Amino acid sequence: LEGVTDDNELLLTEALRQAGGDPDRFEDTHALAPPLSAYLEVHIEQGKRLVTSSIPVGIVSGITGIYRELVTVTGDANHAGTTVMAGRKDALAAAAEVVVAVEQAAAEMQAEEVVATVGTLDVRPNAANIIPGQVEMVVEIRGKTSAEIDAVRHALNSQIAELARRRGVSIKQETFLSQRPVPMDKLLIDTLAEQADSLGYKTLTLGSMAGHDAAHMAAVTRSGMLFVPSIGGKSHCPEEASALCDIEAAANVLFHALLKLDQNLDQKGTDTR
């Protein structure tokens, strides 16, 4: 928690104090947590796999790993009109190649749940008549296994080293997030599947390609998830929607799974059957 700030340079620890918290007592919070038998979460899929398959209930097998790094490309800012093409070290042109390399590295894995994205660019000095001297971007890689993420990183790093030499620019890479993939609990997966089957609902077992609370709760107790189909795959936007019949199906599966788990698990999550 220490050192993390918002865009206005307000420390997270200071924000916690302003809200009435005490970061110095962080370790004490564990003692306040009650024993948990299990954690179950229901969420929209945020993708198109369920809706495309016309399946009402998704059972999550695991939650994606998320890796992010800040990539800084440094070239030479100079006059756009008086610097001949052969004498340029254009940071944005080099950064554009990095963006394409990110896409290629993920696509070449040919694995459905492996994706890579550059979603933000900061170009400096960002003027029409100046060759860009520096570009910062965030590279994000997601995969269902750490090995998949590492493979994309290795392929990307090789391409970055080659284009830095070819273009005469420097490229710095700084990791700031490396969240490992998290499998969901097998007992919860099986219970959710059994209850869905008993209720006559078709299911699809799939990995979550977005992060969720269930990934963090897995460090505390048994953790499992259900997905509801997302119309058009849209999420976190005004177009986000799910059919009421699909919401009803997930609610029924959740309800019956909770009853079954209440019979089979003790207060600490141990299977007592």
Image (cartoon, grey):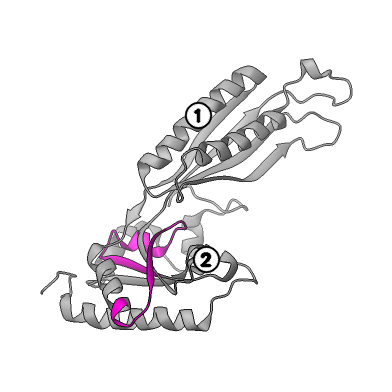
Q: Which secondary structure, mark 2?
A: helix
Give coordinates of residue 101: x percent, y percent. Answer: 58, 34
Q: Is residue 43 above or below residue 151?
A: below
Give coordinates of residue 204: x percent, y percent. Answer: 39, 66
Which residue in the structure is indicated by mark 2?
Answer: 52
Q: Residue 234: in sight, yes or no?
A: no
Give coordinates of residue 90: x percent, y percent. Answer: 73, 26
Which one is in front, 247 or 68?
247
Question: Disc count in the image?
Answer: 2
- In the picture, which quadrant includes the C terminus? bottom left
| Residue range of the region highlighted in magenta in the rendering | 197-226
- Circle 1: residue type: Asn
Q: Is residue 113 left or right of residue 190?
A: right
Identify the residue at image location x=46%, y=35%: 153
Q: Is residue 144 left or right of residue 259?
A: right
Identify the residue at image location x=38%, y=74%: 202
- The tag on residue 157 is 1
Q: Which secondary structure, mark 1?
A: helix
Which one is in front, 220 or 209?
209
Q: Residue 207: in sight, yes or no?
A: yes
Q: Closer to the N terminus: mark 2 or mark 1?
A: 2
- Circle 2: residue type: Thr
Label 2: few (<14), some or many (≥20) within 10 Å? few
Which one is in front, 32 or 224?
224
Label 1: few (<14), some or many (≥20) within 10 Å? some
Q: What residue occupies the far left of the structure in this picture?
A: 273
- The tag on residue 31 is none
